[in-house]
Image: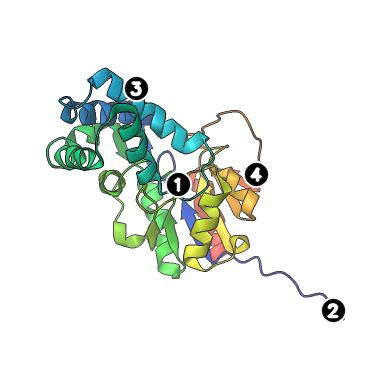
Amino acid sequence: MSDLKQDNTIKAILFDLDGTLLRANMREFIAQYIHKLSSYCADLADPEQFKKTLLATIRDLIHIEGDGSMTNEQRVHTKLHRELAIPESAVRESLSLLRQNDLEGLKNFIHPIPLAQKIVNDCRKTGIPIVLATNPVFPKFMIQARMKWAGLKEDTFDYLTSYENSNYCKPHAGYFQAISEKLDISPANCLMVGNDLSHDLAAVATGMKTFLVDTWLIDRGGTEWPCENRGDHASLQKFLQKQLG
């Protein structure tokens, strides 16, 4: 009996956002996001304590392995209520005020990558599903804003991850598995493109292919994942042209 060859063709592409499709100082971006949000919660909690708690909560989303029973949004609201007694409705109202009044103040931390825009648009033309696979620690409007500032159109993507629709974060295998299930495409036929040695290459654990964009490489140490393909944005463009025809 002849062996059947495994279908390893790329049928979906997952793109990381920060450092992959845009340039960003995320450390400063997150600090300013938390600072602005704390000002709208000042009558409910000491601003410094709020900043410290929310930053710890964001880190927990990434580093603590949840059981997937809650969305990341629910985990944020639960911790803020437990630690600071701030009700969910108040956090939502504060986020709404930030969105209306202070969002543009974060724009200067985000810079477009013209070649990344072209790469995404060329992939869109092939007709295969494209996912914006940014780590879902922010509300959807924060992701949409960064996309806009980076010159990326939301309708170019078939799906994007945010803290409202995600139960895990990178590098948890559950994050990548959930996207695969959402697309109804085997992980073996998905390509994760990102610049983070830990968070993005962790997709390998589910059987996904990877491309490490090393233009603005992030090396956090820790687990070393095998890297099939690596290079700058120009190398990524050539790789995808070859793979997708």
Marked residue nearer the N-terminal end (2 or 4)? 2
Marked residue nearer the N-terminal end (3 or 4)? 3
Q: Please give the name of the residue rendered at 35% of the width and 47% of the height, measured from the top-left corner.
A: 114
In front: 44, or 245?
Answer: 44
Image coords of residue 16 (percent x, y) = 45, 47
Residue 192 visible, this angle? no
* Residue designated by label 1: 16
Q: Please give the name of the residue rendered at 38% of the width and 63% of the height, measured from the top-left corner.
A: 158
Instruction: Say what secondary structure mark 2 lies in.
Output: loop
Image coords of residue 61 (percent x, y) = 45, 38
In front: 113, or 18?
Answer: 18
* Residue designated by label 4: 227
* Residue designated by label 3: 52
Amino acid type, mark 4: Cys
Marked residue nearer the N-terminal end (1 or 2)? 2
Image coords of residue 194 (percent x, y) = 50, 44
Q: CA distance from mark 3 to mark 2?
A: 60 Å
Amino acid type, mark 1: Asp
Instruction: Say what secondary structure mark 4 lies in.
Output: loop
Q: Is residue 205 depicted above or below 109 in this figure?
A: below
Amino acid type, mark 3: Lys
Instruction: Tell whether label 3 touches label 1 (CB within 8 Å).
Output: no
Other residues around mark 1 within 10 Å, as few (<14) / some (14–19) / many (≥20)? many
Q: Please give the name of the residue rendered at 59% of the width and 65% of the height, measured from the top-left corner.
A: 186
Marked residue nearer the N-terminal end (1 or 4)? 1
Instruction: Say what secondary structure mark 1 lies in.
Output: loop
Q: Please give the name of the residue rendered at 66% of the width and 36% of the height, measured from the top-left corner.
A: 224
